[in-house]
């Protein structure tokens, strides 16, 4: 059977342009013993892909080699099986790539229980949920009554962090780039306030909604909200650095705030990436899954249609054009 896949053939300069990809037509091979044929139903598009496309070998994960299928996580269904552990119909999630079909021996993939909608799997149970849980619940050490600021708050990770903050009993402030996103945060998700990180009066506006200062800053974006929040940090505050999307397409990286506040306020600043915690995934997924099934986590998906929509669509992440977790339905 013929199917389509997308290979990375060039490294992007600044913006991700279509010429860095090549759409190829491939033939599904005959399965060997132990293998399964997967039909991918939904693929995740993530800001980290920009880094994976670069030639940087000093990062937390090696780059995608030129000429190979672009890396991504996704949800797939077994459509042919020579492995008793994964009969036809089994749903699996994990790193599958920009492809309609893939052959696998199941290693590195997790079974997804039936009945959970595909969007819920990729918006919450997969990377966004475990990233939010690990960074916020474990590394930020949140406490009831404290104040949390989360940047990129309407995004897939940020929106879960903010909701977890409300479940802990914190005052939660989110920053987001559009009124629609800010209304969703305060109206649907129960954030105490949402602010526009592009506002010329950002520090003043942040000060007004953080009368008791900020105890936890969950960083997804960098940029002006980082400077403003850093000035509002309380003594013994915790900053968890999950992402810096404002720098991913920048020709010159932001210099960042001066370190003097780290001493004055005795701050802890902690960066993390999920590949360091792969062994904790079953436990993290179980915790996130319990919240999801209990109706404690809302989400919204921004779903593109068809494999090739990823080629332009990935840039929505960098313009803020995605309203919710960016997915491709195949
Ligand atoms: N450490 C880890 O292991 C890990 C794992 C997953 C994700 N992450 C990081 O977490 C962050 C959020 O990822 P996500 O998957 O949840 O994406 P997302 O927030 O769903 O989408 C990206 C959002 O970033 C915002 N953005 C884009 N350019 C910006 C800029 N220059 N300044 C401020 N905001 C900007 C846009 O929202 P607005 O409309 O609000 O501008 C956009 O919708 C990313 O930095 C990502 O790299 C880290």
Image: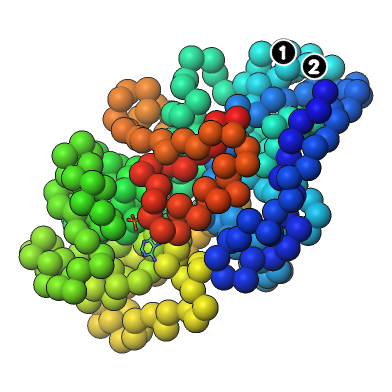
Residue at left 85%, top 30%? 27
- Closer to the camera in the image, 307 or 42: 307
Image quadrant where residue 199 sits = bottom left
| For residue 88, side relative to residue 59 (left or right) | right
Q: Is residue 252 above or below residue 155?
A: below
Residue identifier under label 1: 88
Q: Within 8 Å: ligand 1 and the Cβ of disc 2?
A: no
Image quadrant where residue 300 sits = top left
> In the rendered image, is residue 187 in sight?
yes
Residue identifier under label 2: 81
Work out which quarter of the rendered image holds the N terminus and state it. top right
Work out which quarter of the rendered image holds the C terminus and state it. top right
Q: Secondary structure at mark 2?
A: strand
- Closer to the camera in the image, 37 or 162: 37
Residue at left 35%, top 65%? 239
Question: How far across and how far down the image is residue 167, in percent?
Answer: 24, 39
Residue at left 47%, top 43%? 326
Tag 2 near tag 1, CB within 8 Å: yes
* Label 1 neighbour load within 10 Å: few <14, some 14-19, many 20+: some
Q: CA distance from mark 2 to mark 1?
A: 6 Å
Q: Where is ligand 1, by quadrant?
A: bottom left
Q: Secondary structure at mark 1?
A: loop
Q: How many marks?
A: 2
- First in sequence, mark 2 or 1: give its number: 2
- Closer to the camera in the image, 325 or 284: 325
- Closer to the camera in the image, 81 or 329: 329
């Amino acid at each position: 059977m013929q199917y389509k896949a997308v290979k990375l053939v060039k490294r992007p300069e600044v913006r991700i342009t279509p010429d860095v990809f090549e759409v190829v037509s491939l033939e599904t091979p005959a399965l060997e013993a132990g293998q399964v044929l997967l039909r991918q139903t939904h693929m995740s598009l993530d800001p980290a892909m920009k880094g994976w496309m670069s030639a940087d070998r000093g990062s937390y994960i090696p780059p995608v080699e030129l000429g190979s299928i672009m890396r991504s996580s996704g949800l797939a269904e077994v459509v042919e099986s020579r492995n008793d552990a994964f009969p036809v119909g089994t749903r699996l999630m994990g790193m599958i790539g920009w492809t309609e079909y893939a052959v696998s021996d199941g290693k590195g993939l997790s079974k997804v229980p039936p009945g959970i909608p595909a969007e819920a799997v990729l918006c919450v149970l997969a990377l966004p949920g475990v990233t939010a849980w690990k960074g916020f619940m474990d590394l930020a050490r949140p406490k009831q009554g404290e104040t949390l600021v989360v940047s990129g708050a309407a995004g897939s990770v940020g929106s879960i962090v903010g909701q977890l903050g409300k479940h802990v009993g914190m005052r939660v402030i989110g920053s987001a780039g559009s009124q629609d996103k800010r209304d969703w945060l305060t109206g649907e998700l129960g954030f105490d306030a949402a602010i526009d990180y592009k506002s010329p009066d950002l520090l003043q506006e942040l000060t007004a909604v953080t009368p008791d200062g900020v105890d936890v800053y969950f960083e997804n974006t960098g940029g002006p909200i980082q400077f403003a929040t850093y000035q509002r940090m309380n003594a013994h505050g915790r900053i968890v650095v999950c992402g810096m999307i404002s720098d991913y397409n920048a020709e010159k990286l932001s210099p960042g705030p001066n370190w003097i506040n780290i001493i004055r306020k005795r701050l802890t600043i902690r960066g993390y990436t999920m590949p360091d915690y792969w062994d904790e995934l079953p436990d993290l997924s179980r915790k996130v899954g319990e919240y999801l099934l209990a109706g404690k986590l809302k989400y919204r998906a921004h779903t593109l249609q068809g494999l090739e929509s990823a080629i332009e669509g990935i840039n929505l992440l960098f313009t803020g054009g995605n309203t919710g977790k960016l997915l491709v339905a195949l």
